[in-house]
Amino acid sequence: LAQQTGFVRRRARKLPPLLFVQAAVLLVSQSAVSLRRWAVLAGILGQVCLSKQALWERITPRAVAFLQAVLAQVLGRRLHPISAGCPAALQTFGRVLLQDSTTIKLAPQLAGAFPGSRNQRGADHGQLKIQALYDLLAQRFVAFRLSGFNRNDQAAARDVVDVLRPGDLVVRDLGYFVVASLRQIAQAGAFFLSRLRLDTGVRDARTGQPLNLLGALRRHGHLDRLVRLGE
């Protein structure tokens, strides 16, 4: 993978690809993330003397592509293969895109680029939010986006529109529920699966009258009909 992504072109002496990945994985478990800590971890694991400047020179777009490829490979091995026994409900979709996010605490010096929440003393600390899109059928990542903690999942709900294809299915949790984003997904010829926010109006698509969703479900057990969401 390191050769395929261009991360290495010849045999690395101080920082071979496996050591680079191992140190990166351990770095995530630290209380704060910094180049100095990353270099120290790599030095301990590989029994080498590595400066943070030398490590910084290796942090290139090729290094990012390499780490993404490793992550996709690991997830692909841990997930059960879907292609052989794909459920019938998924076979009609071109891709099944799972969107989710995670956060990583950073050093206070990075709070300007990646602002986080304030602690009890009112001090700011850095916090990185990673938004990811994963194609469940192909078992590969489609997109990543980095931001500070202050960009929440609702703000990221429209990110999926940039990579949508007709026939895609987007699966997200309630944190991404934004009616305008759902409209954009539908207008792109794609589909979505989401929980419903309780404060969202549901109306009959033909009459425009409010729909008693709970009452209808109690009567019929399930519903398959067009509705209008929001006000």
Image (cartoon, rainbow, N blue to C red):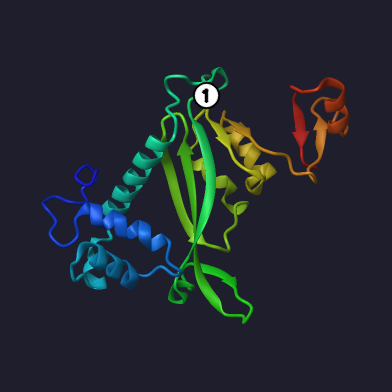
In the rendered view, tell whether residue 110 sits above or below residue 93: below
In depth, the one of 107 and 197 nearer the eye is: 107
Q: Dividing the picture into quarters, in which one does residue 216 lie? A: top right
Position of the C terminus, as image quadrant, is top right
In the rendered view, tell whether residue 57 sits above or below residue 195: below
Count neighbours of disc 1 (C-alpha within 10 A) and say few if under 14, some if 14 to 19, many if 20 or more: some
- The residue depicted at 52 percent of the width and 54 percent of the height is 102
Residue lying furthest bottom:
121
Position of the N terminus, as image quadrant, is top left
The residue to which callout 1 is attached is: 93
As drawn, is 106 to the left or to the right of 226?
left
In depth, the one of 70 and 161 nearer the eye is: 70
Q: Can residue 161 be seen in this view?
A: yes
- The residue depicted at 52 percent of the width and 24 percent of the height is 93
Location of residue 68 in the rendering, given as x and y in whole percent from the top left corner: 35, 47
Q: Which amino acid does label 1 sit on?
A: Phe
As drawn, is 174 to the left or to the right of 85?
right
Location of residue 107 in the rendering, given as x and y in whole percent from the top left corner: 44, 73
Location of residue 129 in the rendering, given as x and y in whole percent from the top left corner: 50, 58
Q: Is residue 211 visible?
A: no
Location of residue 195 in the rendering, given as x and y in whole percent from the top left corner: 69, 39
Q: Is mark 1 on a helix, strand or loop?
A: loop
- The residue depicted at 55 percent of the width and 68 percent of the height is 116
- The residue depicted at 42 percent of the width and 27 percent of the height is 81
